[in-house]
């Protein structure tokens, strides 16, 4: 179609909204089918990425017997004559004679021939001889105690966090093969938006331009300052040009506003002009109903995605957790996120035949979810004090004591929930 303004009367009515759970499954599947290429990265550059092959050990762990205490590596029943010292990082000579010992540091290699390690605090030295009674439990770590060479410790698809990085280093790895981080961009639509100062004269402050990139980074995306554009003028040509430019470098372009079919809502005709296919076009969820995900093919033959977020701020975040989170899990080769559950402390109303995502604060120790206040679609006050959204399924309401799924808000890349 033309990239000039399309009359509202000519626009095709939207199809029935997808169910919330169906929409999540659908976008995850298309993300997984378009999983990002693999790259080798130094360990220090892998936090927040995803393993594309199992993490295995290059040697036994530990690779050699190591003392777990400071003390004496002894041979025989004693008393023992001191014949040397072993520090961490050195290879000791064997103990070949009974009733001999070497002083040994924690983490040092236990010499061949040693029969026990005596703790320094449980030993005595007199007349040049060491005496004491070693404990019955060996005071050293045996080779393979933690893992054997080539043992699989973590499967492909595991998110990399600092603990995984440390384990990989222990295993002897210098690099890891991971999925390339998704590259994301954001287009802010709406002539009514201000980018500085307080709201005034019928114009409101843009809250999504500054915040959505931060949410995307917490989902593991790379977002540069130059990738955030807007407000884009409320004309179809401006929308087409902005989206085409953003798609040149991004795997995912998020847009804010314009997801309905009003006189200045140009996202749908823009997607048509660029030859996009809808993966999901509206979702039966409140808030956040007019969300969408579309797919295009880039010049390199790889899929690109456009996530249309509603203009109301809380609705936009609902769209992020509903569509963007499972899409990115697929693109990164991870499993579909499994939602934790919590017990409702208070009643939460249903939303008829729509899923209700209700903002809650979660006491993780008690496993209890407390609904928060100030949760209108245009409000962010409730979101700022929340941990996630309680899922109230269609045709139901949440009663105190009900166990319900919780959609968590994203943490920092690599961070794990408590």
Image: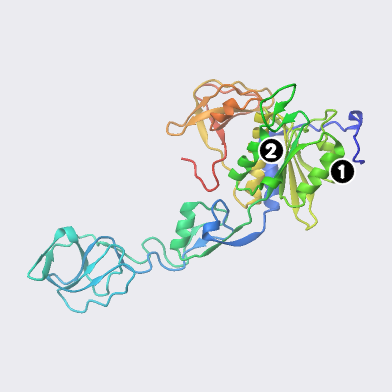
Decide if residue 113 is on the left or right side of residue 383.
left
> Whole-percent x and y of residue 345?
49, 23
In the rendered image, is residue 271 in sight?
A: no
Q: Is residue 42 above or below residue 345?
A: below
In the rendered image, is residue 181 in sight?
A: yes
State the scheme by which the image is colored. Answer: rainbow
- For label 2, the SS is helix
Q: Residue furthest left?
A: 127
- Judging depth in this view, the residue of 24 and 80 nearest the camera is 80
Decide if residue 9 is on the left or right side of residue 415.
right
Q: Earlier along the polypeptide chain: callout 2 or callout 1?
A: 2
Answer with the quarter of the image where residue 118 lies. bottom left
| Disc nearest the viewer among 2 and 1 | 1
> Whole-percent x and y of residue 405?
56, 33
- Judging depth in this view, the residue of 22 and 289 nearest the camera is 289
Mark on residue 22?
Answer: 2
Answer with the quarter of the image where residue 200 lies. top right
Q: Is residue 68 above or below residue 414?
A: below
Per the image, the residue denoted by label 1 is 273
Mark 2 neighbour density, 10 Å: few (under 14) some (14–19) many (20 or more): few
Q: Is residue 334 above or below residue 54?
A: above
> Whole-percent x and y of residue 340?
53, 37
Mark on residue 71?
Answer: none
- For label 1, the SS is helix
Give the residue at x 56% y 38%: 339
Quarter that holds the N terminus? top right
- Judging depth in this view, the residue of 275 and 47 nearest the camera is 47
> Whole-percent x and y of residue 300?
78, 58
Q: What whole-number distance in Å separates the C-alpha atoms at marks 2 and 1?
A: 27 Å
Mark 1 neighbour density, 10 Å: few (under 14) some (14–19) many (20 or more): some
Q: Is residue 108 above or below residue 264?
A: below
Q: Residue furthest front?
A: 197
């Amino acid at each position: 179609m033309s990239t000039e303004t399309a009359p509202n009367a000519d626009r095709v009515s939207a199809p029935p909204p997808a169910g919330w759970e169906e929409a999540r499954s659908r976008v995850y599947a298309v993300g997984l089918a378009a999983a990002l290429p693999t790259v080798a990265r130094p360990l220090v550059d892998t936090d927040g990425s995803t393993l594309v092959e199992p993490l295995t050990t290059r040697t036994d762990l530990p690779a050699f017997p190591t003392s777990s205490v400071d003390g004496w590596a002894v041979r025989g029943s004693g008393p023992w004559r001191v014949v040397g010292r072993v520090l961490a990082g050195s290879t000791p000579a064997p103990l070949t004679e009974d009733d001999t010992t070497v002083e040994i540091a924690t983490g040092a290699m236990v010499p061949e021939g040693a029969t026990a390690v005596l703790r320094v605090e449980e030993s005595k030295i007199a007349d040049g001889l060491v005496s004491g009674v070693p404990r019955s439990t060996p005071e050293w770590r045996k080779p393979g105690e933690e893992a054997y060479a080539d043992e699989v410790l973590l499967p492909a698809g595991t998110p990399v966090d600092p603990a995984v990085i440390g384990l990989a280093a222990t295993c002897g790895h210098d690099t890891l093969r991971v999925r390339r981080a998704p590259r994301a961009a954001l287009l802010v639509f709406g002539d009514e938006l201000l980018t500085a100062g307080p709201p005034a004269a019928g114009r409101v402050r843009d809250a999504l331009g500054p915040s959505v990139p931060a949410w995307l980074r917490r989902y593991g995306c790379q977002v540069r300052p130059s990738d955030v554009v807007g407000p884009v003028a409320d004309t179809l040509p401006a929308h087409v040009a902005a989206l085409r430019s953003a798609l040149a470098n991004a795997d995912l372009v998020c847009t804010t506003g314009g997801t309905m079919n009003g006189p200045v809502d140009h996202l749908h005709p823009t997607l048509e002009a660029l030859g996009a296919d809808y993966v999901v076009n509206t979702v039966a969820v409140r808030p956040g109903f007019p969300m969408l995900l579309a797919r295009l093919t880039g010049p390199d033959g790889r899929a690109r995605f456009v996530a249309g977020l509603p203009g109301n701020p809380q609705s936009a975040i609902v769209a992020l957790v509903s569509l963007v989170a499972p899409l990115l899990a697929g693109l990164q080769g991870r499993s579909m996120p499994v939602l934790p559950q919590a017990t409702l402390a208070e009643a939460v109303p249903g939303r008829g035949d729509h899923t209700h995502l209700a903002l809650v604060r979660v006491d993780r120790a008690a496993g209890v979810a407390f609904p928060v206040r100030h949760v209108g679609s245009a409000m962010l006050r409730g979101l700022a004090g929340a941990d996630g959204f309680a899922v109230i399924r269609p045709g139901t309401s949440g009663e105190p004591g009900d166990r319900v799924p919780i959609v968590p808000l994203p943490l920092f890349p690599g961070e794990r929930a408590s």
